[in-house]
Every structure is written in C-alpha cells, then in structure tokens.
C-alpha cells in the first residue's frame, strides 16, 4: 500500500531494503524455531517419566501452554509473511531460507510424530495411531496459517509420503469403523463412524487432497460401505444409508459412481433377507406383511422406489416371457408356501399399481395361479 501511494513498484525498491527485510524476518522465524525445538526436545525427555506423577502432569501443562503460545506467534508470523510473499512474488523456501526446512521438521514432529532424522518412508502406524493423529490434528487445525503452511508437505520429497499416509490412516479408520458397525449395529458405533467421516472430510478440506490422488484407498472405502449395507440388518439400513453423502465427500465421488453398486447391493440383499426370513417358522396371517415390510425397507432407499420394484421383479420373480426366474424357481422348490406369499404380494393390484408395470402384475398373477395348481 505504501508503494502504491508513492507510485513505486515493490520490485523496484532498493535491494538493500529487501535484503534487510528478509534478514530480519528470517531472524524472527529462527528465534521462534529455536524455542519451538527446545519445547519439543523437553517434551520428548518428559515422555520417559512416570505419566501419573504430579510433577510430570504439571510440567506437561506448562509445556502445553508454552506450545500454544509459540504456535500462536508462528501462526501470526506466517500470516504476515504470506501477505508479503504474495506482493513480492517469493516462495516460502526463498523467503524463509533454512528456516523453512526447520519449521517443516518441527511441525512434522509435533503434529505427525515424525522425529528429526527418522525415515518418513516407514509405516506411519509404527509411530502414530489414529487416536493420536486425531488429537494432534485437532490442535493443528486451530491455526489456519500453520495448516496452510503444512499443505506444502505434499510437494516436498522429504514429507510427501508422510502427508499421504495421514489420509491412508483416516481411510483405514473409516473402514474399521464400518466393520465394527457391521458386527454391532448400535447407536454407539454409528456415532463413531459419523465422527470418523467428519474428521476425514475436515482433513481433506484443510489439506486439499486432489481427486486424482489415493484412488485405490478411496475405492476401498466405497467397497467397505457397500459391504456394510450388505451386512447390516434391514432395520438398521436407514441410519447407514444416511452416510451416503459423507461417503461421497470423503471419497471425492462427485459423479456418485458408488450408486451403481449400492443399487445392486440393495436388490441382492433384499432377496437374501427374504430367503433368510423364509427359513424361519412363519405365521400365515403375518407373512405377507413381513415380506412387504422387508421389501419396502430396501426400496425406499433405492430412489425412486418404482425403479426398485420394476428391477427386482424380472430378476427375482418373473421373467418377461412369463416364466419364473431362477431365484423364484429355487424358492418354490425350497419353500412353496413362502413363494406363494411372495407372489401374492406382487400380484396385489391395489398396492402394486404404482410400483410395478401392468404386465408385471399380470405376470405375478399368472405365476401365482400356476403355483397354486401344482400339487
């Protein structure tokens, strides 16, 4: 602003002035880095002490306060530096000089657990658990400018593997949470999955993960989600499918390619659920309602429901030529009364007139009559 008011362009300022600015700026960051390094070394020394010791707890409280204080100063410094670098067109490596590498090293130590001199090529799980990463990243994201600075890791050969490993750690945690939910479909595990999805989405937004990166890992998450839908009891299907939007965001599935396998899964799992129900002792007065209920649970999430019924029918009930599908034929051999009940549901014109095509309803009625006439 001063240069604009004076009618001068900043690059034309005296080189000595710019050199002096760079020198003082680097000195300021050097001092911050020195204190930051000292704090990290002290924290490392304290880590070997008895954790329940009162002296240890007090020392850690003081260290936490000092760490927050220095991070706040660094964050403020980076804001001013970023504005200045934008004006004069310098990169952080040039502007900060040797301090750039040191700051990256200290931040990686604090927030990722990668100590100086340690190889970043090893498995991140050897020194950083998801719980620890969650705690440290919560701290990191309190500082906007430091977060922006850390984005540079993905372009730095020394840290890019580590940078992407953080995402892999989060994707793997989502998959583990879904496996846990499949085994124990309760509210606690639903909340855990929701929290993990939220934290991964926030990580992607803060670190700006490109859609073309970690494609296999994202696909693993999509596959695990489809497996979860397949494994979950139909009564718990609603809360699980409410995560669809979150899954699309964390896997950066803008075109919603996941919908094709989900629709296939809903069809297959619906019929599997029906056959499992058929294996149970059935009450004649409730079996049709129970069949309708199970089909409805899956159809309501297919969207539109009409497509679900009209796609389900030729695959699992009756083919276009009027014959039974392979699945229905097997069901007839295994449990004829249940097959009759299933056909009675689909041949009910009143309840199916807006869900099935007229020819499909007629087909169901024909198949029902044929089945009743079989001794």
Image (spheres, rainbow, N blue to C red):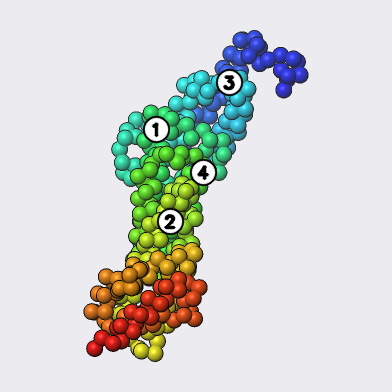
x and y percentages locating residue 230 in the rendered image: 35, 64
Query: Which label number is shown at residue 259?
Result: 2
Mark 1 or mark 3, earlier in chain: 3
Q: Nearer the viewer, residue 135 or 350?
A: 350
Mark 4 or mark 3, earlier in chain: 3
Determine the residue positioned at 48% across, 35% down.
151
Q: Say which of marks 1 and 3 sits in front.
A: 3
How far apart marks 3 and 2 lie (CA) works out to 45 Å
Q: Nearer the viewer, residue 7 or 56?
A: 7
138 shown above or below 195: above
Query: Which label number is shown at residue 89?
Result: 3
**Horizontal side, residue 29 vs residue 166: left or right:** right
x and y percentages locating residue 350 in the rendered image: 49, 81
Determine the residue positioned at 63% across, 14% down.
11
Q: Is residue 158 visible?
A: yes
Determine the residue positioned at 48% across, 44% down.
204
x and y percentages locating residue 165 in the rendered image: 37, 41
Label 2 Cα neighbours within 10 Å, binned few <14 / some 14-19 / many ≥20: some
Q: Say which of marks 4 and 2 sits in front.
A: 2
> What residue is shown with label 4?
205
Determine the residue positioned at 31% across, 41% down.
123
Q: Say which of marks 1 and 2 sits in front.
A: 2
Query: Which label number is shown at residue 185?
Result: none
How far apart marks 1 and 2 lie (CA) works out to 35 Å
Mark 4 or mark 2, earlier in chain: 4
Q: Cβ–Cβ below 8 Å for labels 3 and 2? A: no
Query: Which label number is shown at residue 159?
Result: 1
Mark 1 or mark 2, earlier in chain: 1
| The C terminus sits in image quarter | bottom left
Which quarter of the picture shows residue 182? Answer: bottom left
């Amino acid at each position: 602003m001063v240069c604009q008011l004076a009618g001068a362009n900043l690059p034309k300022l005296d080189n000595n002035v710019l050199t002096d600015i760079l020198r003082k700026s680097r000195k300021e960051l050097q001092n911050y880095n020195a204190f930051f390094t000292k704090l990290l070394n002290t924290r490392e020394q304290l880590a070997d002490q008895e954790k329940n010791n009162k002296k240890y707890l007090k020392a850690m409280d003081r260290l936490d306060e000092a760490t927050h204080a220095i991070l706040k100063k660094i964050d403020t410094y980076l804001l001013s530096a970023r504005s200045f670098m934008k004006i004069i067109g310098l990169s952080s490596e040039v502007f900060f000089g040797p301090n750039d590498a040191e700051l990256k090293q200290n931040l990686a130590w604090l927030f990722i657990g990668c100590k100086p001199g340690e190889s970043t090529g090893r498995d991140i799980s050897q020194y950083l658990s998801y719980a620890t990463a969650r705690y440290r990243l919560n701290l990191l994201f309190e500082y906007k400018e430091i977060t922006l600075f850390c984005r540079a890791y993905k372009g730095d050969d020394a840290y890019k593997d580590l940078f992407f490993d953080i995402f892999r750690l989060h994707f793997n945690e989502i998959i583990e949470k879904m496996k846990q939910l499949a085994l124990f479909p309760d509210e606690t595990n639903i909340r855990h999955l929701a929290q993990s999805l939220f934290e991964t989405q926030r990580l992607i937004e803060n670190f700006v993960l490109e859609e073309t990166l970690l494609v296999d890992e994202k696909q693993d998450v999509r596959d695990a989600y489809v497996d979860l839908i397949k494994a979950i009891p139909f009564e718990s299907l609603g809360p699980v499918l409410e995560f669809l939007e979150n899954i699309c965001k964390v896997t950066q599935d803008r075109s919603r390619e996941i919908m094709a396998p989900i629709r296939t899964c809903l069809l297959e799992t619906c019929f599997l659920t029906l056959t499992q129900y058929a294996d149970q002792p059935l009450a004649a007065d409730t079996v049709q309602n129970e069949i309708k209920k199970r089909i409805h649970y899956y159809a309501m999430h297919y969207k539109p429901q009409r497509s679900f019924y009209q796609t389900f029918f030729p695959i699992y009930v009756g083919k276009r030529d009027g014959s039974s599908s392979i699945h229905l034929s097997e069901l007839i051999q295994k449990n004829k009364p249940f097959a009759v009940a299933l056909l009675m549901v689909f041949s009910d014109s009143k309840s199916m007139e807006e869900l099935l095509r007229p020819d499909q309803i007629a087909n169901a009625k024909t198949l029902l009559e044929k089945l009743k006439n079989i001794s």
